[in-house]
Amino acid sequence: MRALGWLLAAWLLAAAASAGYPVVQPGVTVVLPQDSGSHPDFRTEWWYVTGWLSTAAGQPLGFQVTFFRTRPTLARDNPSAFASGQLLIAHAALSDPRRGRLWHDQRIARVGFGLAEAAVGRTDLHLRDWTLAAGDGAFTAKVAAEDFELALTLEPRQPPLLNGRGGYSQKGPAAASASYYYSLPGLAVHGQVVRGGVAEAVTGSAWLDHEWSSAALDAASVGWDWVGLNLDDGGALMAFRIRDAQGAVRWAGGSWRRADGQVQSLAPAAVVFTPGRRWRSPRTGIAYPVEWQLEAAGMSLALTPLFDDQESDSRLSSGAIYWEGAVEARRAGQRVGRGYLELTGYGERLQLR
């Protein structure tokens, strides 16, 4: 449920059928590892890794590495080598409390010419020298951004979590408003972060999401709130809600994996987001609720950010502005987990370039 991914799907909902894109179908089960790679016939797809890191000195950092693939509505028989049937977009961000705002970078390229590729059947993505790939039982993510660098190894410690019904994740009242969606919570992370030319060893935990769809949101939906939490007891919680133009809940859902491995799919009525304190961006003027009370899976969790200014501005690649940042989850005042929170649709209506 990544910001650009859902944004692409939302604005192109009406066009999906006429353009011949495949439709997400209930009853189809995600199969791994085959489905870990690209699904190029679908309109849009995204691989999204977020997590908390700690330096050797104990300083906390948040990070995000995301690859988006989209198939434009171009004639597929166009003979021109420049009329690529696929685009790749990549975002990377580092949340550093010492800086007090995100480091953020972005890239976009047509697939092909050796510049950008998204493999079928396996997780293997690159956009120039930015990469996310699976191999030897672990993922590697490498980003050389303008102001920072990431070189991370992410090792799965839990089985994949198929969200919804076998990976069919409904995002609205209509069955077609859906995506195929699985998560890999609880990834153990180690590697290196470079800031200001200084390299530091880091360790931590992360969460990987992979979704693909042709039309995830319906026309009445304007934004969403999403959180993925690695729980301190070894469990994992994903929860989301979709909002309409008046801020009312259009749809909600989620997944809860208990510490003993049992998985529960959360129905719309079982997920309640209540916004709390807001922070206003000094750059865009958008006010985001950065503190929340979340009721899900029988838990009442207070979500608080690592720091307030975790706004991402991706207008150079996608036109989207959204808040996405590291958060802690507390229950009765005690920390019970860490993860990432995404907030979209709080500013002006988003337009794709």
Image (cartoon, rainbow, N blue to C red):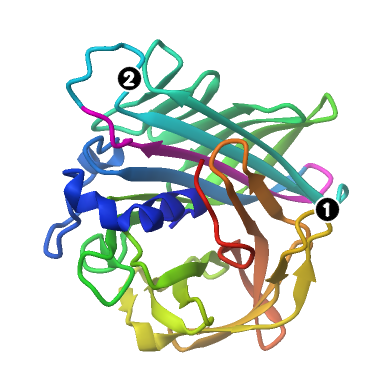
Label for residue 97?
1
Viewport quadrant of the N terminus? bottom left
Type of amino acid under label 2: Ala
Type of amino acid under label 1: Pro
Residue 264's spot in the image, x, y percent? 32, 76
Chain part drawn in magenta: 56-75
- Left or right: where 204 falls relative to 128: right
- Distance Cα–Cα, label 1 vs label 2: 43 Å
Label 1, residues with CA under 10 Å away: few <14, some 14-19, many ≥20 = some
Question: Please, what secondary structure does the residue beneath circle 1 have?
Answer: loop
Residue 12 in sight from this viewpoint: yes
Q: Residue at x 25, y 38 (%)?
A: 39
Q: Residue at x 42, y 55 (%)?
A: 6
Front one among 75 and 37: 75
What residue is pinned by disc 2?
Answer: 83
- Left or right: where 126 falls relative to 144: left
Residue 185 in sight from this viewpoint: no
Q: Residue at x 84, y 58 (%)?
A: 282
- Is 71 within the magenta? yes
- Left or right: where 126 falls relative to 167: right
> Looking at the image, is 70 positioned above or below residue 338?
above
- Left or right: where 233 falls relative to 281: left
- Is 195 within the magenta? no
Label 2, residues with CA under 10 Å away: few <14, some 14-19, many ≥20 = some
